[in-house]
Image: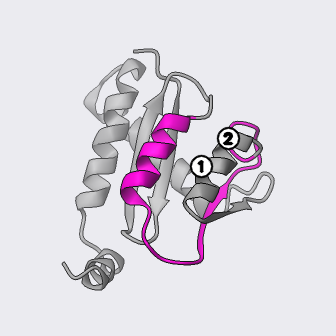
């Protein structure tokens, strides 16, 4: 379908990964609005880390969306592949490549592998996820 990029959100409140594949690196304004309307917790001191590229961090429309939901925007460090945000992208990239290679699939199937990885990752139990569910009363 022409997807060449993705957006990834790690929700520290629910401990879940959310994401979508994109046709371009253009700011996914509608996707962000929809995500925050449905997933933004009703707590104070919310923040989001964005890399300092122009698609999100420097986009005034993106800043307005996050401000509407009371998020502070924090930048990642330049070329900081060791930061948690960048590490998540690298982990998913490696997982998607491994899934495609292991299944003998062409690169055109990467959007399906991306969504499949998120579903698997979110379904795996962990101590952190269990604590988050306990906090939410589940």
Residue 61 in percent (x, y) is at 67, 40
Q: From this viewpoint, which residue is outermost toward the front?
A: 68
Q: Secondary structure at mark 2?
A: helix
Q: Secondary structure at mark 1?
A: helix
Span highlighted in magenta in the image: 28-57
Residue 44 position (above or below residue 39): below
Residue 57 position (above or below residue 77): above
Kindly report the distance in space between the C-alpha atoms of the residues bearing marks 2 and 1.
6 Å
- The residue shown at (25%, 64%) is 124
Of residues 66 and 123, the one nearer the viewer is 66
- The residue shown at (59%, 77%) is 45
Q: Quadrant of residue 42?
A: bottom left
Residue identifier under label 2: 61
Left or right of residue 107, residue 60 in this image = right
Q: Quadrant of residue 103?
A: top left
Would you call the spot at circle 2 few (<14 residues within 10 Å), some (14-19), or many (20 or more)? few
- The residue shown at (24%, 70%) is 125
Residue 37 position (above or below residue 3): below
Left or right of residue 65, residue 80 in this image = right
Q: Quadrant of the N terminus?
A: top left
Residue 124 can be seen in this image? yes
Q: Are marks 2 and 1 in contact (CB under 8 Å)?
A: yes
Of residues 100 and 33, the one nearer the viewer is 33
Question: Does the magenta run of residues contain 30?
Answer: yes
Q: Indicate how the structure is coloured in the image.
A: one colour
Residue identifier under label 1: 65
């Amino acid at each position: 379908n022409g997807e060449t990029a993705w957006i990834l959100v790690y929700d520290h409140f629910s401990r879940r990964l959310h994401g979508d594949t994109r046709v371009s690196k253009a700011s996914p304004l509608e996707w962000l609005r929809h995500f925050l309307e449905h997933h933004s917790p009703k707590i104070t001191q919310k923040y989001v880390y964005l890399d300092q590229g122009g698609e999100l961090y420097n986009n005034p429309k993106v800043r307005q969306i996050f401000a509407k939901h009371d998020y502070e925007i924090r930048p990642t460090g330049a070329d900081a592949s060791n930061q948690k945000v960048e590490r998540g992208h690298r982990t998913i990239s490696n997982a998607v490549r491994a899934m495609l290679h292991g299944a003998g699939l062409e690169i055109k199937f990467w959007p399906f592998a991306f969504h499949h990885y998120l579903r698997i990752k979110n379904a795996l139990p962990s101590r952190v996820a269990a604590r988050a569910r306990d906090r939410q009363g589940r």
